[in-house]
């Protein structure tokens, strides 16, 4: 019997390496529009995950107010945990694409579909997170020369471009870690969920998607960062809506960037 389009295979060893496609530089804007469409089509389960993101954002703000030198670690944790929290959003988009009922329940345990490889991917991101957290504290210790301010004081220094040496080193080091995480996670989890793909192939396919489409991936990264910042600046209310849009859009990024499996 022919294999349905993109249906998971029984034996992951039978899966070919994902074929990465070229996409136009404007494709991320279409992914966002499609993400909005999934949010409006499946509002209740989508907004549930949005509230989860908002709760994570509130936790970061609380810590920032009392110990902002650790906020970089928590913020990176927010970005690292994002793809795992968004797994349910990928499943909502998959079910909506197939014309199935949008329900929250099945999305909560979707990770079981490929738990071993998703766990391995989590370990990889966890190691990156721990290294970045340590590097962040070292940068603060070596380059932050001013007295430790409160939240408004720290943001004021950033806006006023004070302590430029610290800002240059801090954001430079952060950009390196952010690029690594983005490179290995563009399509990794959707691949592991949709095809039962192994973690290594999924991460390599993500890196290939980045290297083959640098323009589109730069636009996509900027959109993700911009929507996240807007969500934080709106007192986290925006995260409730914007993060589900990003999650759903990531599914369509995967659909565009990775060619369907051949019919068997």
Image (cartoon, grey):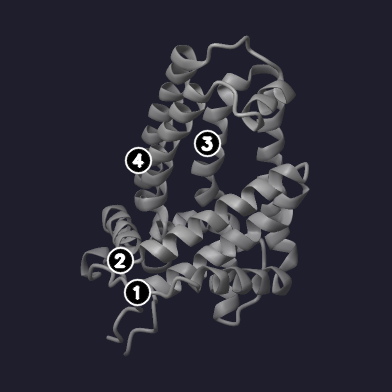
Which residue is at 53% across, 43% downward? 79
* Position above or below: 47 against 18: above
Quick one: label 2 or label 3, which is nearer the N terminus? 3
Q: CA distance from mark 2 to mark 3?
A: 27 Å
- Seen as rendered, the residue at the extreme bottom is 1
Q: Secondary structure at mark 3?
A: helix
Compared to residue 48, the image places residue 235 above or below, namely above
Marks 3/1: CA–CA distance? 30 Å
Helix, strand or loop for disc 1: loop
Give coordinates of residue 143: x percent, y percent. Answer: 47, 16
* Relative to 61, 207 lies left or right: left
Above or below, comparing residue 6 to residue 165 in the picture = below
Residue identifier under label 2: 212
Q: Which residue is mark 4?
A: 124
Looking at the picture, how far across and down is residue 237, in whole percent?
78, 48
Tell me whether the residue at label 4 lies in contact with that at label 1, contact meaning CB atoms closer than 8 angstroms.
no
Mark 3 / mark 1, whichever is N-terminal: 1
Label 1 sits on residue: 22
State yes or no: discs 2 and 3 in contact (Cβ < 8 Å).
no
Residue picked out by circle 3: 77
Count of marks placed on residues:
4
């Amino acid at each position: 019997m022919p294999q349905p389009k993109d249906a998971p295979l029984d034996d992951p060893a039978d899966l070919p390496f994902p074929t990465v496609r070229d996409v136009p530089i404007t494709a991320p804007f279409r992914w966002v529009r499609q993400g909005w469409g999934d949010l409006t089509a499946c509002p209740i389960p989508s907004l549930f995950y949005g509230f989860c993101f908002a709760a994570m954002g509130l936790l970061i703000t609380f810590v920032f107010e009392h110990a902002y030198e650790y906020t970089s670690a928590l913020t990176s944790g927010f970005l690292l945990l994002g793809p795992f929290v968004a797994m349910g959003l990928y499943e909502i988009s998959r079910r909506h694409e197939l014309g199935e009922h949008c329900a929250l329940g099945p999305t909560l345990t979707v990770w079981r579909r490929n738990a071993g490889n998703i766990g391995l991917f989590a370990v990889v991101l966890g190691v990156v997170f721990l290294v970045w957290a340590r590097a962040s504290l070292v940068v603060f210790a070596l380059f932050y020369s001013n007295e430790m301010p409160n939240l408004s004081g720290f943001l004021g220094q950033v806006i006023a471009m004070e302590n430029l040496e610290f800002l240059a080193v801090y954001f430079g080091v952060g950009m390196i870690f952010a690029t690594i995480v983005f490179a290995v996670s563009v399509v990794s989890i959707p691949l592991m969920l949709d095809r039962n793909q192994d973690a290594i192939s999924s991460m390599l396919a993500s890196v290939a998607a980045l290297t083959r489409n640098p323009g589109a991936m730069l636009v996509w990264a900027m959109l993700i960062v911009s929507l996240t910042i807007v969500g934080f600046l709106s007192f986290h209310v925006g995260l409730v809506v914007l993060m589900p849009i990003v999650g759903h859009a990531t599914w369509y990024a995967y659909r565009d960037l990775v060619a369907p499996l051949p019919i068997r």
